Structures are given as C-alpha cells and as structure tokens.
Amino acid sequence: MTQTGIPFIFMRGGTSRGPYFNRADLPADRETLAEVLIAAIGAGHSINIDGIGGGVAVTTKVAMLSPSEDDWADVDYFFAQVSVDQRQVDFKPTCGNILSGVGPAAIEMGLVVPASDVTEIRIRAVNTGAHVLARVQTPGGVLRYDGDTEIAGVPGSAAPIALNFMGVVGSSTGAFLPTGNLRDTFDGVEVTCMDVAMPMVIARAADFGLTGYETVEELDADRNFFARMEAVRLKAGAAMGMGDVSQSVTPKFGLLAPARDGGTISTRYFMPWTTHPSMAVTGSQCLASCALTPGTVADGLLDRPNQSPANVVLEHASGTIEVLVDFEMNEGFALSSAGLLRTARKLADGQIYVPASVWKGH
C-alpha cells in the first residue's frame, strides 16, 4: 500500500471545521503526528489542494479524542492548529469552536454512551487543562443534530450544545494578567494582556486608527495594520512569558470599540495573521473578561455590568456571540465560569489517507 488510511469524522464545530480523530488511531510521537496532520489537511498550499483543509485557519483545525486520564473528565480533547500555507502545526492553543463538536464526536466514536434526552459530557482540554461540561441533545438516547438554534457565522440552525468552561484562568501562562499589569504599552499602543481560555493581547481599535467596525475583508487588506499589530503581539508575547511567539498562533489579538448594534461591546478577533470571520469561543471568554474588568483598555467603551452572572454580548464581524460570565468582584475581577451556546454537525466519516512515506500506520 502506498497510502495509510486513518478513521475520522469530519465535523463542523461552532464556526470552525475539521477532522476529528480517535487519538489511538494516530502516531504517538509529536513529530510524526505533525507530519500526518500536515498531509491530511494539505498544509503548505494556499487552498490546501492536496488535503481536506479549506484554505483558511478556521477550516484547518484538528480534534483528537481519547478516554480521559483526568478523574473528573470523560473525554480528553487534544487540539492542533494546522497552518494553511506553511507546513506547520501548533499544539499550544485550544479551540472552543472545535470543542463544540467533541461531545457529538465522542458519542459517534463510542467513547461516550448517551444517558438520557440530554447527555452531559465532561471534557478535559489537554492543551490547557481546562474543564468543560458539554450538554448534548440525545432524545431517546439518539444523538441529534437538527434543531432551532442559530449561531452567527453559520447558515441555518441545529441542535443546541451548551458549554460551561471552568478552570480557564491562566490556562496557558499561569496568570490572569500574565504581565502583572492591567495595561501595558508596546510600540506606543496601550494593551491589556490577559489569559482566560486563550492568552490574548487586547487593544482599542481607535489606537490603531480604526473604527472597530471594519469588515473582515477591509481588515485583511490593511497590511500596515497587521504589521503594526504583529510587532505589538511579539513584544507582548515575550512580556507575557511566552518567549518568541513569531511561529505560534498564540497569543491571539483582539480589538475593542463601543457597541453600535445593541451589544455590550464591539470586537474583532485575529488568528493572528488573518481576521477571524466571526469569533472564537475561547477568545470570546477572554474578551468578555476584559470587558468586565475595571482598569483594562475596555474602560470607557461600555456600561460595565456589575452583577454576576453577567450576559456579555460581543458584537463581531458576522453578528454577535453571548457569553454568560459568573464572576466575583472582591479584590478585582475573578472568573468562576463562562457559558456559551454552540452547535455542531457531522459532515462526513470514513478514512482519510496520507502517504505511507509519512506514516505506515500502527
């Protein structure tokens, strides 16, 4: 055989898409694993012509599932962000949108047996150690994908998947404020460096000469902005204790502006070298936490809720996303948990093939 077949489920999770694998079906060592994922996605080409990637970062993501090694959890979720046009895989971050499909995929793979009309699945995000409780619709013990829930950035509707994130503060850097400051200044731009579900560098759009309401296409075409943003991100990443982040997708970058469509605050999220078409689930938690924390760059951009739980509505490039934040304000902001509603859908299953020269299989 000149190719190796690997079982997979192809799923949309939230506003992202990619293959979901049983970790046992993949090579154990990271170097070979990276080469297998590069081949499967077709990384290194702008439209991933030799793989199943979709030519943008939200369609070159991978989920790998296994029975959990954590006493609390049912399933371990190991995430990989595969590059679009470079032969590169980043195992550092996690992805909350892809996580939306972990519950259904775990049932599809036989890792979890539906228990009732709604099956609760405890998920450990391996990359960050975060705990997530997913509630998946399984009426009569049958996994359901159709429903009436709509999310911005995805056409149509589907069955709701409720996610409750716990233990996400400092999940990557070990600190809520990795630099120890509510605000820092790099290259003359004031930012808040925060680590909630995803380490982020957050700035006001106006400080880059932007409104914060630009379209994805307008932002992606503004290469001067991206050059300035990347220079700030690199310096901030080092100050956050993350070292040289020039080849890493973390920390991510976000922009804030006053809401204009009835939400809490307007946002734009970057992956980081292109603009996210909507909003990352992990990024939404960090941006919502920044909006709720006095003294951050969000000051003056919103009427800050002061009662917990707070429903923070983030306006983004495709619509809105709501984050229900349970927090305390004793000595500063302290996050207890964040809840979001997502959807997922199984698109295909079977085997994906990679050259045997990359991996001959088990």
Image (cartoon, helix red, strand yellow):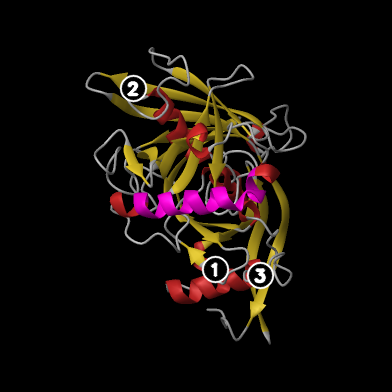
SS for tag 3? loop
Q: Earlier in the sequence, mark 1 or mark 3?
A: 1
Residue marked by disc 2: 294
Q: Which residue is mark 3?
A: 42
- Res 192 quadrant in image: top left
Q: Amino acid at mark 3?
A: Gly
Q: Nearer the viewer, mark 1 or mark 3?
A: 3
N-terminal of the pair, mark 1 or mark 2, is 1
Q: Which mark is residue 324?
A: none
Rounded to the nearest angstrom, the CA distance separating label 2 from label 3 is 44 Å
Identify the residue position indicated by label 1 in the image: 25
- Disc 2 is placed on an element classified as loop
> Is 50 situated above or below 2?
above
Q: Earlier in the sequence, mark 2 or mark 3?
A: 3
Q: Left or right of 258: which side holds 71?
A: left
Q: Are marks 1 and 3 in contact (CB under 8 Å)?
A: no
Q: Quadrant of the N terminus?
A: bottom right
Q: What is the magenta range?
A: 219-236
Task: Tell me if residue 326 is in the magenta stretch.
Answer: no
Residue 125 is situated, as x and y percent measured from the top left of the image, at: 43, 48
**Distance CA(mark 1)–CA(mark 3):** 19 Å
